[in-house]
Image: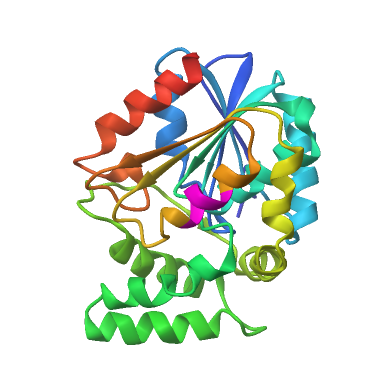
Amino acid sequence: MAAEATMHFHGKPPYRVAVLHGGPGAAGEMAPVARALARDGLGVLEPWQTAATVDGQVEELAATLRNEAAPPVILIGFSWGAWLGWMVAARHPDLVRKLILVGSGPFEASYAAGTLETRLGRLAPAERAEARALHDRLKEADRSDAELARYGTLLSKADDFDPMPEDTPVSCRAEIFQGVWSEAAELRRSGKLLALGSAIVCPVVAIHGDYDPHPAEGVENPLVRVLRDFRFVLLPKCGHRPWAERQAREEFYTRMEREIRE
């Protein structure tokens, strides 16, 4: 079987925008956003992160931007990708012109305490039991990519408000998920993740759905305290993935294009 490509180019160079997928270890889910933005004449990079550590992903992305893009770029990070973009903007400020956080996880652990239970509570009993079992399985050394993919499918059902039909292939890597997430959760718990905000000099915009199980106040409140140039946008009738939402998709892209053109 041929190896999966880890770099995807949308539109024509110069590539001044990059989209960062979530997961961690769920590459490809931002492809619809990259394609939509490229239709407006933008050059958009869609890199697939392959490192299984936080520092590895940060430096991998920084090297990608230097080698493939025309920095400083606009970084659009979704979910885990929002945190990854945050860390790159802090450690490599010369590479980032603006940071857009979409569906970010909360930046302080106190806001994250009920996220999993909110998600599980939105599922039918059988799916809830399956998701809980998979959540525990993914901590084991012999967890599989297929189990991560199934877990992601169940969580998407809980995360979406009014989703549109879609068929976006996602490449799931359980090794990346476990290696990166365990480190990232500790960075948040220790306060080191939020503290990086003092090193971010570019404008930051957070776009969040009001139905997203990740609490909006867990993004807005901490970032207001640490950033010099920050705006928060709450989209109504919108879950975790705004581009997939029937009632929020148009407003999401309108706001996205406005932020990119500024």
6 vs 133, left or right, is right
Q: Residue at x 30, y 66 (%)?
A: 158
x and y, in percent, of residue 59 in the image: 80, 44
Q: Residue at x 74, y 58 (%)?
A: 192
Work out which quarter of the rendered image holds the N terminus and state it. Answer: bottom right
Number of labels in the image equals: 0
The residue stretch that appears in magenta: 218-222
Q: Nearer the viewer, residue 239 or 153?
A: 239
Please say if 197 is above or below 141. above
Q: Is residue 65 magenta?
A: no
Please say if 206 is above or below 96. below
Please say if 235 is above or below 104. above
x and y, in percent, of residue 61 in the image: 72, 40
Report the magenta stretch's main SS.
helix
Q: Nearer the viewer, residue 190 or 9?
A: 190
Q: Residue at x 41, y 19 (%)?
A: 258
